[in-house]
Image: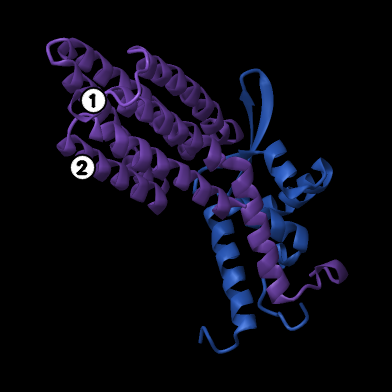
Chain colours: A purple, B blue
Amino acid sequence: MEPSEDDISPAEALALIERERANLVRDIRPDPRLMYWPWGFAWLICFSLFFLRYGPGGRIYVDLPEWLPLVAMLVLFVVAGLVTGVAGSKPMRRTSGPGAWSGRAYALSWSLAFASLSVLFSRIGGHLPEQQTGLLWAGGMVALTGALHMAGSAIWQDRELFALGAWTSVINVAGIIAGPGWHSLIVAILGGGGMILAGALGWRQLR
Amino acid sequence: MTESPDLDPVIHAQARLRVVSALSVLNEHDKITFPVLQDSLRMTAGNLSVHLRKLEDAGYVEVTKTHQGRTPATLIRLTRRGRLAFEEYTAALRALLEPGAST
């Protein structure tokens, strides 16, 4: 045994272990704020715009240009996708092995699944009334987001991520049943809010 | 630690305990690149290399030299044996803190 500098108490040694583990977790895991907040705020802002322009029963609360909610959504989603793409690739750049592969496969699953639904909804959306088309797109994408969060929780053994996915799925169903307009409001406040909360909680755990 | 005859001498050295603690975060079979580990531990490259060699000699870590694109890269992972030693070490520390708790 090497004396002198290694003369620390068991309590100090356990504290040292926890400190180094926490340091490495911070160094190789994505920042939860960068993973959740861009999407949380994107949902909050764009679905609020949808609610204000295309309210329940076709009501217009604020007379925004017709194109504004959709354009805002596209722009915010592209920005959020870029931010989470870069932040989420951190573990893959810093480690290698099955864990890095899981991350890559998970990222591809998001892109491919969203592309599949987009093609399907574009094809059948034209045959539905405008309000129903909006509900189809929003409800489908939110359902997919909830499902992928729950699947991600199975990969990373992350209970908070499962809770977020289950929450997103439940409020989505509630919104779909409530109908167009209400769905936008519910997803904006409870869905976007849920992701902002998840980012804050995850960040607090990592600090 | 004075009254610790049962503690594994390989990871009882503070620097190596820090290395093994950090590596224990990774899942089995996952590897970390040398510079990231060095950064996280705030050690010099030379110092870290020395301790990694001792851990490698004990069969606790596996060091792989590879190429990422065209740049050479060194990847490190904790072996099953290393993880077991780390778990036994932390269990022994806890037992020292709460004598009688684990017996």
Q: Which residue is mark 1?
A: A59
Rendered residue at 50%/21% (across/down) = A79
Q: Position of residue A42 (x, y in %)?
A: 44, 29
Q: Are marks 1 and 2 on the same chain?
A: yes
Q: The residue under label 1 is which amino acid type?
A: Arg
Query: Given this view, does label 1 or label 2 mark the residue nearer the observer?
Result: 1
Of the pair B67 and B41, the residue shown nearer to us: B41
Which residue is situated farthest in the left direction here? A127
Q: Which residue is mark 2?
A: A174
Residue A114 located left or right of residue B90: left
Say if mark 1 contacts mark 2, CB within 8 Å: no
On the question of residue A97 being in view, the answer is no
Residue B37, compared with residue A116, is above or below; it is: below
Mark 1: secondary structure: loop
Rendered residue at 29%/47% (across/down) = A166
Residue B91 located left or right of residue A36: right
Q: The residue under label 2 is which amino acid type?
A: Ala
Task: Report which quarter residue B46 is drawn in.
Answer: top right
Disc 1: CA contacts within 10 A as few (<14), some (14-19) or many (>=20): few
Rendered residue at 81%/73% (across/down) = A7
Residue A126, compared with residue A107, is above or below; it is: above
Q: Chain of mark 1?
A: A
Q: Chain of mark 2?
A: A
Of the pair B5 and A63, the residue shown nearer to us: A63
Mark earlier in primary sequence (1, 2) = 1
Rendered residue at 45%/17% (across/down) = A75
